[in-house]
Amino acid sequence: MKRRDFVKNTTLTAIGASLIAPIAALAAPKTTHLESEDLTLLPKIKDDYTVHFMAIGDWGRNGEYDQQEVAKQMGTWGTDHPNDFVISNGDNFYPKGVVSEFDPLWHYSFESIYTAHSLQCDWYPVLGNHDYHSDVDAQIRYSKISQRWHMPARYYTKELKLGKAKTNEDEPAKPGEKEKSTGKEKALLIMIDTDPFLHESMTDYVQKQMLWLNETLAKADENVKWKIVIGHHPYYTVGPRINNDDTLTMRKGLEKTLNEHKVDIYLSGHEHSLQHIKPEGHTHQFISGAGSELTGVTAGVPNCRFQASEHGFMYFAMDAKRLNVRAISLKGDVLYQTELTKSA
């Protein structure tokens, strides 16, 4: 080999080695550390509340009467906003409930309607009057089949950890101010079974349930900052049942207990509309029953702060000091917003 050829080949070999080394380094496998949360889609709109949920009632109509469209908007809202679970305010299946945990209505009115990824969360339902026309306990048994339907009994409780409210820890306490948030604060959700209140044959059952409700509220510890009772029938309304036997019976049966135990919110359906009523006493009543068919409302009724005969749902966000409630329309518009506050 001639000397100049040797030098040229040696030089090319050296250059090739210097290029291959970085390329090989780039191709070498690297160890990554990713948790599932790192790959999960997060809400586009964040806030500083610690718990969020939607509430919808009177919905189970095989997707008709705009049930499908409301469900789609719930999915969109849940994609854009934080959401931990859904409350169902009863009349889950029209016209006569479900006959078993294998009834086709589970598919046609629930599973194939609320399909958005954001709605694949826990659902906590109560029973409505239409649910009572068939096997009401089938809705309890379905909890063993579904990963998201959670109904352990006809009436039951759910505690929520609220975490710390947003505070400035360095800010000195004001005169008379209660202690700052400790992170132990909770909300107590109590789901009740209201249709039996309307039937004399179920008086014993109602008395047993009311004893349980009073004891549950009385035993709530000091860390429970928000008490929310959920049932199907309202005890005040500006809908068609404003002076109906249903409404008057529920008022007689519930109002005293709710106020004596300082229940913050009574949430219901039954009236196919969206309402916020603040009667005398401690408790605010919200009606979210606009999941499918609509009924009318009356404007100008004293103590009614908001009413709308529009398809939609309600959205709740809370921490230890604040409880924000919004009424969301089928189009995603915020029809109404209010916020309750208290010391931590």
Image (tube, helix red, strand yellow):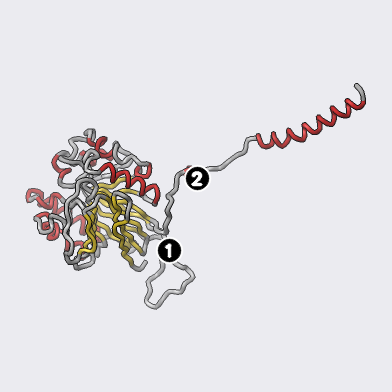
Q: Is residue 221 above or below residue 192?
A: below
Q: Is residue 215 visible?
A: no
Kindly give the residue lying farthest to the bottom in the view shown. Answer: 175
The numbered mark at residue 38 is 2
Rendered location of residue 214, percent (x, y):
20, 59
Residue 178 x/y as whole percent? 37, 71
The residue sitting at the left extreme is 200
Q: Residue 283 is drawn in which quadrant?
A: bottom left
What percent of the width, then of the height, locates residue 160? 34, 54
When the figure is inspected, residue 282 is found, relative to residue 330, above or below; the finding is: below
Q: Which label sits on residue 56?
A: none
Q: In front: 174, or 296?
A: 296
Relative to 323, 108 lies left or right:
left
Task: Please tell me the numbered disc located at residue 166.
Answer: 1
Kindly identify the amino acid type of the residue bearing the numbered disc 1. Lys
Mark 2 vs 1, N-terminal side: 2
Is label 2 in contact with label 1 (beta carbons under 8 Å)? no
What amino acid type is highlighted by mark number 2? Asp
Viewer-side residue, 220 vs 337: 337
How many residues crowd around disc 2 within 10 Å: few (fewer than 14), some, or many (20 or more)?
Answer: few
**In the displayed structure image, the side of residue 95 where residue 31 appears, left or right:** right
Give the residue displayed 81% in from the left and 30% down from the top: 12
Of 83 and 331, nearer the camera is: 331
Task: Name the quadrant of the N terminus.
Answer: top right
The spot of residue 284 in percent (x, y) is: 24, 62
SS class of the residue under badge 2?
helix
Please name the residue shown 23% across and 33% down the image. Answer: 104
- Residue ranking furthest to the top: 1
Is residue 38 at all visible to an observer of this figure? Answer: yes
* Residue at x 91%, y 27% (from the top left corner): 4
Q: How many callouts does the rendering have?
A: 2
Residue 240, by quadrant, is: bottom left
